[in-house]
Image: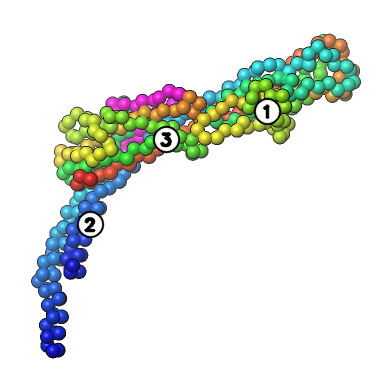
Amino acid sequence: MRPLLLAALMLALWPLEIRAQNFSLNAHGTVASAVSVARLSDLAFGATAIVPGTATSVTPANGARIRVDFNEPTTVTAPDFVMIAGPGGALLRVDLVCAQDPTPSAAAPTAFAAPCAGGFIPPISGNVGGTHYIYVGGTVAPAASASLRAGSYAGTFAVTASYVNY
Amino acid sequence: MSRLHGRRSNARRPRPARRALALLALLAAAPAAAGAQYAVAQVQPLAFGYLTQGVTEIVAPTDAFRRGVLTLDGPGQAWIRLVLPTALTSALGATIPLQFLTGDVTAQETGKPPAAFDPTTSTRVNLSKGTASLFIGGRAVPAADQRAGDYTATMTIIVSSTKF
């Protein structure tokens, strides 16, 4: 084919290609955050008496259990200790020990890498959220109960889930 | 012998008149191509808004607030086709499937009511009477435990002066 003829053919075809133009349009949506924390059982030292001046503890597996449902990364925290009140306003310090497991009745849940206040982020990957369980045990140090009045002690602490709100 | 070679060589060269004619033809064709330019503007994106986990969210092409709207300007007629996304995607890589069914995409020429068309095949739009609009609805299908976050997608409209 002669060069001029070839050039003419190419130039004749060229406009067909540049006539097609592309443009973009956006679509968007938002999935709202859905995080909940539910208490399954309390931390209870039970009928076992705390002997003043001696240590008493409840392991996380036998302590409080909390269910956390989440659909985004969530940091779950509890306080490092709680003061529970007894007769005449006496206060007893209970140091909390936190652990976690994906199942609700783990015999040996995994301890938090940090103290309870340092928190734990349940694993999440891919498209969906999930459910995780937090276990909270407690320890009464000998010094905390050394000169304590006899009686029944009770208190509350909060387990908190923090997340970005969509 | 040498004269014969000279004649053959001259015969292969294009004549000046023929070359000029070809050049004129090319110059005449070029403006036609440049004239077939289209302008597409996004009036509003396709907005599914807040999605409920496990609930399919449907945006109709008649939903004035949430449908995607494009305007198309240009000479004569245009052939259009849409490349629709299969999913919304979050910054963390989570996805929500999208569905576009028959009737979810409509085109409206000036002076006419919107008419549904198959966005996956080349469809003709008459622009000789003015701007045409495209209305895009669709369905987002989040999972029952869909991850929270903002999700986005991009769709592409291809416009041509010829069927493709």
The quadrant in which residue B138 appears is top left
In the rendered image, residue B109 lying in the magenta stretch gets the answer no
Specify the label residue A14 is tagged with: 2
- From the image, tell me which residue sits under label 3: B88
**Residue B3 spot, x, y in % from top left:** 12, 88
Chain letter belonging to callout 2: A
- From the image, tell me which residue sits under label 1: A100
* Amino acid identity at mark 1: Gln
Q: Give the residue at x 16% y 58%.
A: B29
Residue A35 in view here: yes
Q: Quadrant of the C terminus of chain B?
A: top left
Marks 3 and 1: in contact by CB < 8 Å? Answer: no
Give the SS element for disc 3. strand
In the rendered image, residue B58 lying in the magenta stretch gets the answer yes
- Kindly report which numbered mark, 1 or 3, lies closer to the viewer in this rendering: 1
Question: What is the distance, in whole Å, between disc 1 and disc 2 at their CAs?
Answer: 66 Å
Q: Which residues are magenta?
A: B40-62
Main SS class of the magenta portion in the image: strand
